[in-house]
């Protein structure tokens, strides 16, 4: 495995100003969209989906935030348009598999069913163009291995909700001043030791589970912490979210796994990390930001 850092110039999105930029992928993983929540960046996601063609689309849980909607019904037109766009993609031939998470848990009752051309599954294994097997799951099943107790979990949820409120207010101020989107919540999480410990425990639990499934890698969501890294013989990917980070995992038409981040100023995404899979020896080459 060779590691190469992306320079600032390399990481910037390439924009074709003469026409609508189209993304084309073999497979795409999205999670933690949280439709029905005020913190959902539905407008950004809608722009991305309308530019994108993918053969397979995997929805890795927490697509609709039923928890938030139980507290207060919030469903603007942009959230409805995201769902409509997903159904249009399914009708036009994109294979869509949906693995419900904890915020959309009622949909777990429909595992094994096909609703509006969308297949619902508990887990799923995707085979890449190079023959690698990737396990897909949300990750909420590992909460007991990460959390130290229900009381602290509830406290953590409330603090996170407060962070998202502050994040929303800061975004309005930055937008008014002409600055791009920046996540205060992500910035704080990366600098709090307890949060980093929880992320490490979650990663270890997911990788340990995947090792027993005879796969080459695993893609999950749940913790809103995008990542693409090598963990022993497996690669670990977290596709992030569309609340704080606006990120996703994609398999390119060349069979390369990529972590993308949406850029609101250029209305396109750019690669922040990638792993090239060698067909013959299944070696990994990682490109990190």
Image (spheres, grey):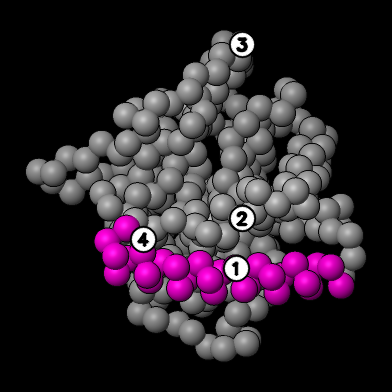
Q: Secondary structure at mark 4?
A: helix
N-terminal-most mark, 4 or 1: 4
Residue named by callout 1: 163
Q: Which of the image's four quarters has the N terminus?
A: top right
Give the mark toward the camera: 4 or 1: 1
Give the mark toward the camera: 4 or 3: 4
Q: Report x, y in % for residue 62.
A: 60, 64
Residue named by callout 3: 281
Residue drawn at x 80%, y 67% as measured from the top left: 153
Q: Is residue 103 above or below residue 120?
A: below
Q: Is residue 192 visible?
A: yes
Q: Secondary structure at mark 2?
A: helix
Q: Is residue 23 above or below residue 267?
A: above
N-terminal-most mark, 2 or 4: 4
Q: Secondary structure at mark 1?
A: helix
Residue named by callout 4: 44
Q: Secondary structure at mark 3?
A: loop
Q: Which contiguous range is marked in magenta?
A: 151-179
């Amino acid at each position: 495995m060779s590691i190469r850092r992306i320079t600032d110039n390399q990481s910037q999105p390439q924009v074709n100003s003469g026409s609508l930029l189209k993304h084309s992928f073999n497979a795409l993983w999205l999670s933690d969209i949280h439709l029905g929540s005020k913190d959902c960046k539905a407008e950004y996601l809608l722009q991305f989906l309308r530019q994108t063609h993918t053969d397979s689309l995997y929805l890795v849980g927490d697509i609709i935030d039923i928890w938030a909607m139980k507290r207060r019904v919030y469903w603007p037109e942009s959230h409805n348009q995201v769902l409509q766009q997903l159904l249009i993609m399914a009708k036009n031939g994109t294979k869509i598999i949906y693995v419900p998470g904890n915020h959309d848990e009622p949909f777990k009752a429909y595992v094994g069913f096909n609703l509006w051309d969308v297949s619902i599954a508990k887990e799923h294994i995707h085979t890449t163009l190079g023959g690698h097997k990737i396990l897909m799951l949300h990750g909420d099943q590992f909460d007991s291995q990460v959390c130290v107790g229900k009381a602290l979990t509830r406290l953590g949820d409330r603090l996170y909700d407060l962070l998202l409120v502050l994040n929303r207010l800061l975004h309005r101020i930055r937008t008014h001043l002409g600055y791009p989107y920046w996540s205060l919540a992500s910035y704080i999480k990366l600098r709090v030791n307890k949060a980093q410990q929880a992320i490490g425990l979650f990663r270890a639990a997911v990788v340990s589970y995947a090792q027993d499934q005879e796969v080459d890698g695993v893609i999950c969501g749940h913790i809103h912490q995008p990542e693409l890294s090598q963990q022993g013989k497996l690669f670990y990917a977290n596709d992030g979210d569309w609340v704080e980070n606006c990120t996703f995992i994609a398999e390119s038409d060349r069979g390369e796994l990529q972590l993308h981040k949406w850029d609101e100023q250029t209305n396109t995404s750019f690669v922040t990390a990638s792993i090239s899979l060698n067909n013959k020896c299944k070696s990994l080459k990682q490109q990190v930001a």
